[in-house]
Image: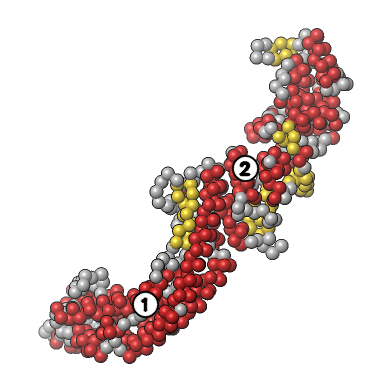
Amino acid sequence: MASALVFDDDYVQQFVFQKDEVLKNSFDIFIKTPDYVAAMEAIDILLAGVKQTLTNNAEIEKTISDFEELRDAFGKSKPGNIPKSSKIHKAFGTGNKTENIPEALKPFETFIKSQEPSKWIGWQIKGNEYLKLGDNCPYCATPLVGEGQKDTALAVEKEFDAAAVGHLNTLKAVIERLGKYFSEKCRENLQKVTKTKIDLTAAEVSFLTGLKAEIDGMITQLEGLRAISFFSLRDVDQISEKITPLKIDLALMDKLDSPETRSITEPVNAQLEDLLTKVGDLTGKVNRHKAKIKKAIEANQVSINTFLKSAGYKYAVEIVPEEQSYKMKLVHRDLAGHLETASKHLSYGEKNAFALVLFMHQVLSENPDLVVLDDPISSFDKNKKFAILHELFEGKASLRGRTTLLLTHDIEPAIDVIKSTKDVFQGAKPSASFLSSRGGIVKEVPIAREDIQTFARVCRANIATLQDPILQAIYLRRDYELRDEVGVEYNLLASLFKGRAVPTLQTAAENRNMSPEEKQAAEESIRDEHLPGFNYDALVAEVNDVNAIRAKFAATDVGYEKIQLFRIFNIEHDDDVIRKFINESYHIENEYVMQLNPHKFESIPEYVIDECVRMLPPII
């Protein structure tokens, strides 16, 4: 076995009900089939020429990054305006004082025109707070005794803002790197603007905003070309009308019209022209791919939503397009819009039902060698259990034909697939086994159709096959109880297990000792119909013999019978849970019409038997 996929609580916690989609990686599970991948590859081959001129090119990537940084420096502005909060305005709006150093700051010219002047300015300003402590320089301790020396030290803070100088220095570096992409006239104008001594004029602002508009346009063009794919063409009616505008026309971007810019745009435009000659083929491939995706989406939605409806849930799923993929979203039939954080809207049972069906589709996608379902449906009511089983093994997209191991504490799925509705599941070729553990050894007993019986039939079969009259009487009392025949025969057996020498008759109307005639009539009825050798007095003596009952307890390997024998000792366990389990005699048989024979299938937990052994009375 090479691979396995397991459904359990960990699966539900890790993969289902993500914040923005119902199932993690829903695109990979529901859409990304081998056919999908092949179609995408065919489309990508047609688009390869355009994409390769822009991708895997470090120079172009760096150029786009620099253009984006310069664009962002303009801030969010209206046409013809540069916000005062923008980096451009802070750097150049009041003149470039690093190029035009005031006379008073000439002594600091070396530092102001250094590689990173903002760091020095910040450092110098930080030290000014210490000048008030004395007349010495806070850095070198030299006396500042000359006229105006302290004012000179403080002048840097008056003239410069470290952050603004930092912006200026960064923008200068970006502009220098981008210089080759600007036209000669644009470079000349940028030199003027970046070295201006005074506030920006209206003409300079107009120039800068025009440059920003062209940079915005260039970035949009390059990003559109870089992102060209099936997804960018998916919702376009006429693909040629989407591709043609991607051609970059530098005649409309005169500020960026340079030989270096053309070295980027001309190869791209040539590839676009070539692509336009193949637009018919591209359109056909895109449309066929869209049709297949639509068909897959509809099939998956119908499959899941049909199950949800048949199981009585008011939820549904929708697979919707995302920018570069598709995602499965949750909707409520009575509400509009998608529900985010599905886990907050669904109950525990709804989560499990949903997760199971989603898991099934993941199995179909990943195709593991073995599928393990760890107790997937025991928490559901009967209708939902059947709906889930049917969807898992008989639905349009089911696990039928796959090696699937379903582990459960619940007998009902076995009843459905082996007996009551076995014809429905024949295509899945099911088999069932009962697992029990004793002393670290796991035992597997196959469950055949004839093993699933009413408990009344189970009781009668054991009465007929067992040899021990006490064990026979245990099952006979159960048989009377199940048939609601709680007359004198039932009361006689109840008195037997209480060890009463004189049996009692307890009804809703009375509680008294049986008369000798009633006792005799009950014994004769039991002998005639069920136990030919039944003798109340002899069996009461045996019930009251501690050693005899201990011996019977040790002799049987059947947990159900051990518990019934243990109850004869009338010992109250100190643990409420164990006591309830023992006193109710494992009444699970009363919860279902059908059941497995506890004499053949070990249904009592080992720890309960161990507790009975621990509390057995001593041998007398």
Asked if 293 appears above or below 411 in the picture, the reply is: below
Residue 15 left/right relative to 211: right
Which percent across, then down, holds residue 596? 74, 37
Asked if 450 appears above or below 569 in the picture, the reply is: below
Q: Amino acid at mark 1?
A: Thr
Q: Residue at x 22, y 77 (%)?
A: 209
Which percent across, then down, holds residue 540? 82, 20
Location of residue 78 by image quarter: bottom left
* Disc 2 to disc 1: CB gap under 8 Å: no
Asked if 21 appears above or below 155 in the picture, the reply is: above
Residue nearest the viewer, comparing 160 with 104: 160
**Residue 299 appears in view:** yes
Q: Residue at x 71, y 30 (%)?
A: 585
Q: Mark 2, residues whose alpha carbon is within 10 Å: few (<14), some, or many (≥20)?
A: some
Which percent across, then down, holds residue 493? 77, 20
Location of residue 300 by image quarter: bottom right
Assign a secondary structure to mark 1.
helix
For mark 1, what is the residue?
244
Q: Nearer the viewer, mark 2 or mark 1?
A: 1
Residue nearest the viewer, comparing 38 with 362: 38
The numbered mark at residue 408 is none
Which percent across, then down, holds residue 302? 53, 52
Asked if 102 appears above or below 617 in the picture, the reply is: below
- Please state, as top left, top right, bottom left or bottom right, where the C terminus lies in the image: top right
Residue 259 left/right relative to 352: left
Which residue of the protein is positioned furthest toward the front in this rendering?
Answer: 280
Residue nearest the viewer, comparing 515 with 385: 385
**Residue 437 appears in view:** no
Name the colouring of the figure: secondary structure
